[in-house]
Amino acid sequence: MSEAIAQTVEREFALITYANLTQIDLRESNYPDAKFGGIFFSGTNVHTGYVYTLGVIVKHDRTPYVNINTEQRGSFLNKGSERQAQCALESLAMTVRERIGGYFQIHPFYGAIYGTHFNPITDFCKGNMDEPLGMTIHLVNDAGQFDDEMTREALYMGNTISVPGPNAQRFLEYMKAVNLRNPNQQDRDQAITNGLGEQWDAEFKKFNPPAKRRWLFFKQPSIPPAMEVTQHSIADMMDYLQELGLRDLRATQANYQGLTSTELDAATLPREKIEHMFETF
């Protein structure tokens, strides 16, 4: 009797990671999209020789986002100048955003391009030789709307990374709210807190232009609607990246969260492509 009961116990996996999934694998996957935790892939642009790493990250406590990174500075400087590498990254990211929509993250000090040596906001931040250049696209549709009350809250607290004493819980509540409402809110508030609000705002409008008024009561959006992250939409995104010249594109890691043993047993994804399994206890 106890053996029969044991056989019916459903197991749950906190995380299962796959490697080298193809577009066909993703399109034919029968896992629920709600349990898809994101994917990382890399490829070399056949036109420029630059290597890029992309990650689509899905978390329950914040909006989904896409990271686009170059190789380390020491590597891309062997293929061209700093300016050439940055322009190539910006061109790729802007082209990708035309397809997937969303808002670029604007760092409070770096601006749109993390690690840049051509800083539009402040010149005291510069990336090191072992760091890449990077841009992030948040897959949201309303990240141009900011909450001034939250900005006042940030100014009151000083918007530090960690707040000791009685403000600790208040700071955590602020962070939770901005991550779910508008991922650019905290960066904007931090820039304002450091006296860089005008520079930040100019960079934000450059990469996230406001809607254009076409008629009296109609505005034409300048930013396409944000892509819904599904396994199928990721496969389409990979197809598009290959069209842009990333011909050796490969998925290095795909994450699934909360899968059950029943779902795993019935999976259409190749079991031999599983890299890691972490069971929920």
Image (cartoon, rainbow, N blue to C red):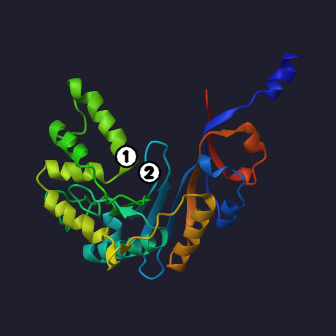
Q: What whole-number distance in Å separates the C-alpha atoms at marks 2 and 1?
A: 7 Å
Q: Is residue 188 left or right of residue 64?
A: left
Q: Is residue 53 left or right of residue 240?
A: left
* Count of picture labels: 2
Q: Is residue 113 above or below residue 174?
A: below
Badge 2: residue crowd in 10 Å (few <14, some 14–19, many ≥20): some
Residue 98 found in image quarter: bottom left
Q: Residue at x 76, y 54 (%)?
A: 268
Q: Quadrant of the N terminus?
A: top right
Q: Residue at x 30, y 38 (%)?
A: 174
Q: Is residue 189 above or below residue 204?
A: above
| Residue 135 in sight | yes
| Residue 20 in sight | no
Q: Position of residue 7 (x, y in %)?
A: 82, 27
Q: In the image, which disc is placed on residue 113?
A: none
Tell which of 214 and 120 is nearer to you. Answer: 214
Q: In the image, which disc is placed on residue 179?
A: 1
The residue wearing badge 2 is 63
Q: Position of residue 100 (x, y in %)?
A: 48, 68
Identified by mark 2, the residue type is Thr
Name of the residue lying farthest toward the right? 1
Name of the residue lying farthest toward the top? 1
Q: Position of residue 281 (x, y in %)?
A: 61, 26
Q: Position of residue 249 (x, y in %)?
A: 55, 69
Q: Are marks 2 and 1 in contact (CB under 8 Å)?
A: yes
- What SS does tag 1 mark? helix
Identified by mark 1, the residue type is Asn
Q: Residue at x 61, y 46 (%)?
A: 35
Tell which of 153 and 69 is nearer to you. Answer: 153
Q: Is residue 167 left or right of residue 41?
A: left
Residue 84 found in image quarter: bottom left
